[in-house]
Amino acid sequence: MVGKSILIHLPLCRKKKNMKRYLSVFILGLAVACNNASDKETATTDSSSMDHMHDAGAMGNVPDLPPVPDGASVYFKNITEGATVKSPLKIEMGANVIKVDTAGPVIEGVGHHHLIIDGTDSIPAGVIVPKDSTHIHFGKGQTETEIALSPGMHKLTIQFADGLHRSYGGKMAATVHVKVE
C-alpha cells in the first residue's frame, strides 16, 4: 500500500531532491513489505499444519481416550459385504452399546462416525482421523449420508471416534466392499 501511494506521487515530484527522498521511502517501504509477506507465508504454513488436529485442544490438556464399552460395535445398517449398488449410494451407519453424539467434549461411552472411502480398514486407537476427501466426518452426530461413487469396486469403512476425532481403533470399525454399477 505504501509503495502504491509513493508511485502515485513520483510523477508529481518536480525537484530532483524530492524525487530522491520519495524513491528512498519507496525502497524502504518495499523492503518492509517483502519482509512482512515472508512472515505471513510462514505463519500460514505453520497454522495449516495443525489443521488435521481439528478441535483436539492442542493448546490445553487433552483427556485420555475413553475406553470402549464391552460389546460396543459399529455396522452398516443397509449395506452388506459384496453388495452391488448404484451411485449415489445411501449409507446408514449404526452403533451398538455406544452412544452416537456430536464431536466436542470427550465423554465415556460416546462418539461419532467417520466414513473412509477406499482407504484403510481402520485407524489405530488414539490417532486423529484425518480430514480429507477419503475421510468423511460426521461430527454433528449424523448416522446416514449419500455419496457418489464411480463405477467399479470400492471399500467403505465406518470408523468410530471420540469427541476429539481420535479413533477408537479396529474394534470400532466396520468394512464392506461394494461394486458400483
Image (cartoon, rainbow, N blue to C red):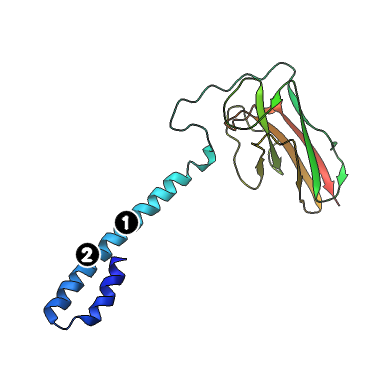
Image quadrant assignment for residue 99: top right
The residue most toward the top is 70
Q: Quadrant of the N terminus?
A: bottom left
Q: Secondary structure at mark 1?
A: helix
Res. 28 mark: 2
Q: How many marks?
A: 2
Residue at image x 84%, y 46%? Answer: 179
**Mark 1 crowdedness (10 Å alpha carbons): few <14, some 14-19, many ≥20:** few
Q: Residues within 10 Å of mark 2 (few under 14, many from 20)?
A: few
Quarter of the image holding residue 173? top right
* 175 in relation to 171, above or below: below
Q: Residue at x 14, y 77 (%)?
A: 18
Q: Is residue 71 left or right of residue 35?
A: right
> As shown in the figure, which amino acid type bears the numbered disc 2?
Leu
Q: Position of residue 24 (x, y in %)?
A: 18, 70
Return the disc, 1 or 2, that comes first in the chain's sequence. 2
Tell me which residue sits at (49%, 26%) in the image: 62
Tell me where residue 42 appears, x and y as whole percent: 38, 50
Furthest residue in direction bottom, as rendered: 14
Image coordinates for residue 21, horizontal then vertical, percent: 15, 72
Vertical comparison of 54 with 161: above or below: below
Q: Which residue is nearer to you in this view: 115 or 15?
A: 15
The amino acid pointed to by label 1 is Asn
Q: Which residue is mark 1?
A: 36
